[in-house]
Amino acid sequence: MSTYEITESSARVNIQDLKGCGFLEPGGNADSEMYPSQPAREWMDSGDDDLAFGILHANVRFIGEILFELRTGVRSREQLLGIANRKYGFSWQTRGQVGDRLCWLRSAGYVVALGREERRVTSRGLEFLERIDLHLPA
């Protein structure tokens, strides 16, 4: 906590988020001991950021699906929010969840911003999309 200058409650939230995303797992005799998951260790050893996004895609909905939806053209966050709710069954009220995911995807170079609102998948994003399994709604 002192390294990152965060409070105990913020640290607990961050740990729960990392656990939920598949990067941490409990270890030892207590749930208070957390260790990198096997997939997270593989990612750290390899340095391959595609593995990190594979972990995210496996544990967080609407990661690879955003890339799938962007493969046919440019979309805004508002359009992606509508797709998330209609096609994938979310009930998100704001673009925040979509925005967070787009930021993650942009940090990996899978998506680029074409302006304030519009996003497009990159060739790197399309390559990643080919490597993952998608389970699209029927």
Image (cartoon, helix red, strand yellow):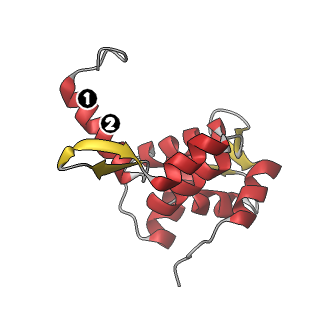
In the displayed structure image, the side of residue 54 where residue 37 appears, left or right: left
In the displayed structure image, the side of residue 110 where residue 12 appears, left or right: left
**Kind of residue indicated by mark 1:** Ser
Q: Which mark is residue 10?
A: 1
Decide which of 59, 36 is in the foreground and name it: 36
Instruction: Classify mark 2: helix, strand or loop.
Output: helix
Instruction: Quickly name the residue at label 2.
Output: 14
Residue 108: which quarter of the image? top right
Farthest residue toward the front?
28
Q: Position of residue 85 (x, y in %)?
A: 44, 64
Q: Residue at x 48, y 54 (%)?
A: 38
**Kind of residue indicated by mark 2:** Asn
Q: Residue at x 53, y 63 (%)?
A: 83
Decide which of 26, 100 is in the foreground and name it: 26
Mark 2 Cα within 10 Å, few/some/many (few <14, many 20+)? Answer: few
Q: State yes or no: discs 2 and 1 in contact (Cβ < 8 Å).
A: yes
Q: Is residue 24 above or below residue 2?
A: below
Instruction: Classify mark 1: helix, strand or loop.
Output: helix
Q: Residue at x 66, y 50 (%)?
A: 50
Q: Quadrant of the N terminus?
A: top left
Asked whether the viewer can see residue 19, the reply is yes
Q: Position of residue 49 (x, y in %)?
A: 65, 44
Q: Is residue 100 above or below residue 136?
A: above
Measure how far apart labels 2 and 1 are at the Cα level.
Answer: 6 Å
Q: Residue at x 55, y 76 (%)?
A: 135
Decide which of 33, 127 is in the foreground and name it: 33
